[in-house]
Amino acid sequence: MSFNLAAYTLVHVVISLIGIGSGLGGVVGFLTQKEFRRWTLLFLTTTVATSATGYGFPFEHLLPSHIVGAISLVVLAGVLYARYARHLVGAWTTTYVIGAVTALYFNVFVLVVQLFLKVPALKALAPTQSEPPFAIAQLLVLVLFVVAGTLAAKRSRIQQHS
């Protein structure tokens, strides 16, 4: 059986996009002090899968994406512990919210990187990803996530919903 890189890439991208979409829904839930259990489970499952499947691509040396994936998996371990072992009691709710928003940020960070690599108009603006348009895009994403994460953490009394 041979490795089909195109199919693997497609599965990885679809999982990533589902994780980002469900994660954005989760952030809205945090901001409204509601947790939607099914969306949470989908987000956590796909986000762990995204980070894990990132290691399945052929590579010759350690890449920045591997480091981001490793950090994301460590953050997600804390999120899973806070959610399922500590049941969001006390400070574990804040740990959970900040960790989930951080894991989502990592996925969106990588999405922006990929968009600047794959979308011709964006690649033309920042062919080496060291140009101002790339830095500005990543800074905007970071600021949005810091603001959303801060607000979510302040509102971290979560009511459980299906």
Image (cartoon, helix red, strand yellow):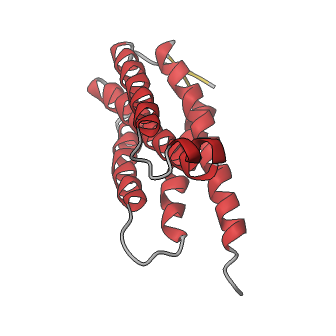
The residue located at (57%, 47%) in the rendering is 123
At 69% from the left and 85% from the top, the residue drawn is 2
Q: Where is residue 21 in the image (x, y as percent from the top left)?
A: 62, 34
143 and 149: which is toward the camera: 143
Q: Can residue 153 be seen in this view?
A: yes
Of residues 113 and 58, the one nearer the viewer is 113
Relative to residue 59, is residue 78 drawn left or right? left
Task: Write the residue at 39% across / 46% down.
Answer: 130
**Image location of residue 119, percent across then percent down:** 64, 47
Residue 41 seen in the figure: no
Residue 149 at x, y percent in the picture: 38, 23
- At 41% from the left edge and 36% from the top edge, which residue is drawn? 132
Judge left or right: residue 62 versus residue 14: left
Quadrant placement of the N terminus: bottom right
135 on left or right of 20: left
Picture layout, residue 90 above or below residue 58: above
Write down the quadrant of residue 17 in the picture: top right
Q: Nearer the viewer, residue 63 or 49?
A: 63
Question: For the view shown, which residue lies furthest in the front direction?
Answer: 124
